[in-house]
Each structure stands twice: as C-alpha cells, then as structure tokens.
Image: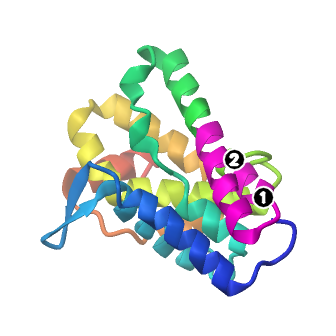
Amino acid sequence: MSSSPPPSAVTEILAQIDTAHASDPNKIDVDGEEVPYELHYAQKSSAYLDKRCPDASPALRIAVRAQHFRRWEVPRSDYPEGKVGYFAWRGGLKKRQAEMVEGICGAVLGDGDGDGEGGLIRKENLKNDTESQVLEDVACLVFLDDQFAAFEKEHNEDKIITILRKTWAKMSEEGRRLALEIPMEGRPREVLVKALGG
C-alpha cells in the first residue's frame, strides 16, 4: 500500500477479510456465543493492536486482521511431522495468506497494490521493521491470552517453558509489558513465572 488509502477502502478490505474468517468451520464459545475461530482470533488481534499501537497504519491494521487468513484450509496434517514439516507449513501459509490479501487490497483499491500488507503478513524484515515487530507482538499476546491455558494442558512443563522463552524473545519491551498485564492464574501463571526466571 504505497499511500494511505481512504478510510472507506480500509473498512471494505477489513469487511472482506472478516467475511472470509466467518467461513471458518471451527467454532469457539465466546461468552456463550458460538463464533468462527478465525473471526475470533482476528478480532482479538485487532484489539491487542489497539493497545500496542493505537496509531497503527492502515497496512498494519489490515495485516494484523488477516494474519490467519483462511488458515483452516491448509491443516498442519497436510505436512510431515517434525520441525521441517512445521516450518514448511508455516512458510507456505504466510506466502498463501499474503498473496490472497494482496489480491483483496488490489481489487478494492483498483491499483493492484497490496505489497505492504503482504510483506507484513510474511513477516519480512522482522528485525529491522517496526511494524513487523508490532505484528509479532500482537501474535504473541494473543497466544498468551487466548491459547496458552489450553496449550499448557497438552504438553509437559519443559516444552511449555521452552515455548514461553521463545515467545518472550520475539517480543519488544512494550509487548512484554502488555503481556505481564494479561490476567493469568493457577498453573499457567506458575509456569510463566518459572519460564521468565521469577
């Protein structure tokens, strides 16, 4: 997105992304209401973006909302077990998601422009790009807030601590500050404290 698009165009792009998310057959209970999981994930991601970077650019808002774009169509089981298969799956997802979102942006804007969003979704230049780091922070915050409690029940403590330390290493100082504000009780809190050396 080479220049700032009109708000109406951003609204339309986000609406098309959410329409796709609403097709996710995987459901989650949110306050007694059944919601497509990826729609829930996208909305929570946008909520954390508002905390992490209230003045986020349109490109970043779109990239955050589309981070798991149509992910359910490419299950992890389509790839081999192990780290090599996992990273191949993740890499394929990023490329696919970026291409589809670039297509939506180009269609709405009428200029074929969507490279900025695609680059963010692919997490290019993560170490040197501020917006890519914000997107990484948001993904980590959603994991800790929305997925960690279930994750820690499925794995042994050593693996959980390893994952938490890797997650922490990916985050900026501001991202870590927000993470420490996430309400967490019982074993999840105990393991987090242990992972952080507290």
Residue carrying label 2: 123
Q: Position of residue 132 (x, y in %)?
A: 71, 56
Residue carrying label 1: 116
Left or right for 163, reference 104: left
Is 7 magenta? The answer is no
Secondary structure, magenta segment, majority class: helix
The amino acid on which the numbered mark 2 sits, given as a three-letter code, is Lys
Residue depicted at 82% across the width and 64% down the height:
111
The amino acid on which the numbered mark 1 sits, given as a three-letter code, is Gly
Q: Position of residue 142 (x, y in %)?
A: 43, 59
Which residue occupies the foreground of this view, 110 or 155? 110
Left or right for 79, reference 40: right
Q: Quadrant of residue 27?
A: bottom left
Left or right for 7, reference 179: right
Q: How is the image coloured?
A: rainbow
Mark nearest the camera among 2 and 1 is 1
Residue depicted at 35% across the width and 55% down the height:
23
Circle 1 packing at 10 Å, graded few (<14), some (14-19), many (20+), is some
Residue 179 visible, this orientation: no
Q: Where the N terminus falls, by quadrant?
A: bottom right
Left or right for 63, reference 71: right
What element does badge 2 sit on?
loop
Q: CA distance from mark 2 to mark 1?
A: 11 Å
Using the image, tell me which numbered label, if any, was put on residue 178: none
What element does badge 1 sit on?
helix
Query: First in sequence: mark 2 or mark 1?
Result: 1
Residue 95 visible, this orientation: yes
Q: Which residue appears farthest toward the left when viewing the image?
A: 32
Is 117 magenta? The answer is yes
Span shown in magenta:
94-120
Q: Are the residues at dot 2 and dot 1 in contact (C-beta closer than 8 Å)? A: no
Q: Which residue appears farthest toward the bottom when viewing the image?
A: 7
